[in-house]
């Protein structure tokens, strides 16, 4: 996830694994936070018209609105469908480029890189195990992101920490972090 501070609140860019219509509506209504994110086609709130790419032209976009949430289905190439939701966009604006890319996609792409980088970094050292219990998946993901954020802050504050093992610093940090409680000492 990535976020930008806006005038009245903030905007969060969310990966399809975490995007849900109820979450988007709650963030807008109760937390003054807008969302732009991809959504899985098998989500219960995605209408059939948005899922289908049959008889649709390349670079065509279908928009739908429900309250503060805009959903769009974009066909960038043959048999490919990109589904996004946004509570930041309330108009079917598209770019002036020849492919007429929707503004929602451009906003998502602007922050997507940071979402992908975090996903790649936590994939290197994951805590989670295979489980079908979604609360456990969320818990493990929160632990992974917290560990990543902690290591980034630590290495920013102490840039020369274990500089001789530059390629293994994050792994060493996570190992020492895990052992710190057992030994009751700080890193």
Image (tube, grey):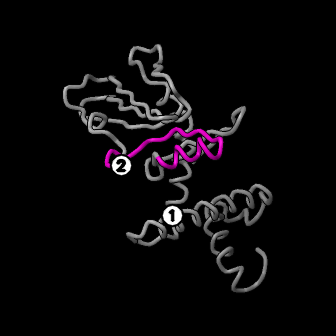
Q: Dot 2 surroundings within 10 Å: few (below 14), some, or many (20 or more)? A: few
The location of residue 9, given as percent across then percent down, is: 69, 38
Are the residues flagged by discs 2 and 1 in contact, CB closer than 8 Å?
Answer: no
Taking 176 as reference, is 143 above or below it? above
Query: Which is nearer the eye, 162 or 72?
Result: 72
Q: Give the residue pinned by disc 2.
A: 43
Quarter placement of the C terminus: bottom right
Q: Dot 1 surroundings within 10 Å: few (below 14), some, or many (20 or more)? A: few
Q: In terms of secondary structure, where does tag 2 sit?
A: loop
| x 51%, y 66%: residue | 126
| x 63%, y 74%: residue | 175
Q: Give the residue pinned by disc 1.
A: 138
Chain part drawn in magenta: 22-43
| x 35%, y 27%: residue | 62
Classify residue 166 by image quadrant: bottom right
The location of residue 179, given as percent across then percent down, is: 67, 80
| x 45%, y 48%: residue | 20
Query: Which is nearer the eye, 45 or 128?
Result: 45
């Amino acid at each position: 996830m990535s976020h930008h501070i806006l005038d009245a609140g903030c905007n969060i860019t969310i990966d399809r694994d975490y995007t849900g219509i109820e979450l988007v509506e709650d963030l807008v209504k109760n937390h003054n936070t807008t969302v732009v994110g991809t959504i899985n086609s098998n989500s219960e709130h995605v209408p059939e018209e948005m899922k289908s790419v049959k008889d649709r032209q390349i670079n065509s976009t279908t928009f739908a609105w429900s309250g503060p949430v805009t959903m769009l289905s974009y066909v960038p190439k043959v048999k490919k469908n990109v589904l996004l939701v946004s509570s930041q966009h309330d108009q079917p604006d598209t770019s002036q480029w020849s492919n007429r890319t929707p503004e929602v996609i451009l906003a998502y792409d602007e922050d997507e890189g940071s979402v992908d980088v975090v996903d790649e970094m936590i994939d290197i050292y994951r805590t989670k195990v295979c489980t079908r219990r979604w609360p456990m998946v969320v818990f493990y993901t929160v632990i992974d992101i917290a560990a990543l954020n902690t290591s980034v802050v630590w290495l920013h504050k102490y840039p020369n920490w274990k500089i001789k093992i530059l390629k293994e610093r994050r792994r060493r940090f996570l190992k020492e972090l895990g052992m710190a409680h057992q030994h009751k000492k700080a890193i």
